[in-house]
Amino acid sequence: MIIDRDINPTTLKLMEALREFHRFGWQEHSIAGCKPSEIRLLLCIKRCMKPGNSDMKVSEISKLLHVTSPSVTQLLKGLEANGLIERHSDPVDRRAVGIKLTKQGEDVIRQAMELRTSAIDGLVEYLGKDESEHFASLISKVVRYFSQKEATMRQSQWNGVEEA
């Protein structure tokens, strides 16, 4: 077992900062009675609606959010019951279900974006422009690092399967 004195002090400091940031959960608050997972789903539908055809399929949403179709379906039931989305059968493929936002769903998204933008505007004001830009750059760099690390791990696991 690794104990704190065996870890580089800078690594420990970064681990603690990330733990605090995660624990705070700044974007994990309900908005207009919607849970964060429901807000993410509504935003996904809004951002990915196809021009001329505003319907999305459960499978498309599932892939975009990296969650199972049953999980998406469960969230959609609640959103539909609250009047935030509409579901209907595809006239061409009756097995497929089209999903689109209602006016009320659009309003919830607008409110969520206003609250998030206001929070980030406050952070920019608190940190200042230069530190905010540096922070954004560092976050992007961290994401790239972990994405590359994950891709490398997946590739090495795939190579291990081929060798077996």
Image (tube, rainbow, N blue to C red):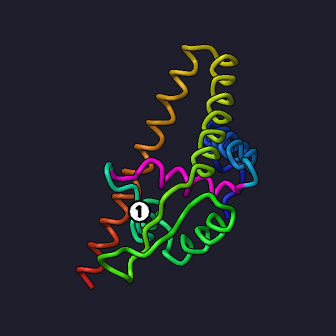
63 and 56: which one is in front?
Answer: 56
Q: Residue furthest front?
A: 91
In the rendered image, the vertical position of residue 127 relative to residue 149, given as above or below: above
Please give the name of the residue rendered at 40% of the width and 43% of the height, measured from the top-left corner: 144
Left or right side of 101 for 125: right
- Density class for disc 1 (Cα within 10 Å; few <14, some 14-19, many ≥20) is many
Considering the numbered disc 1 on the image, is that residue within a helix, a strand or a loop? strand
33 and 86: which one is in front?
Answer: 86
Task: Determine which residue is flagged by label 1.
Answer: 56
**Residue 46, image x and y in percent?**
48, 49
Number of disc labels: 1
Please give the name of the residue rendered at 71% of the width and 55% of the height, measured from the top-left corner: 34
Amino acid type indicated by mark 1: Met
Quick one: quadrant of the N terminus?
bottom right
**Residue 79, image x and y in percent?**
63, 63
Residue 37 highlighted magenta (yes or no): yes
Left or right side of 15 for 154: left
**Residue 87, image x and y in percent?**
51, 69
Please give the name of the residue rendered at 65% of the width and 43% of the height, measured from the top-left corner: 18
Residue 129 highlighted magenta (yes or no): no
Magenta span of residues: 34-50
Q: Give the prevailing secondary structure in the magenta stretch.
A: helix
Which of the 4 image quadrants contains residue 26?
top right
Quick one: quadrant of the C terminus?
bottom left
Which of the 4 image quadrants contains residue 37?
bottom right
101 and 160: which one is in front?
Answer: 101
**Residue 161, image x and y in percent?**
29, 80
113 and 146: which one is in front?
Answer: 113
Please give the name of the residue rendered at 66% of the width and 50% of the height, measured from the top-left corner: 6
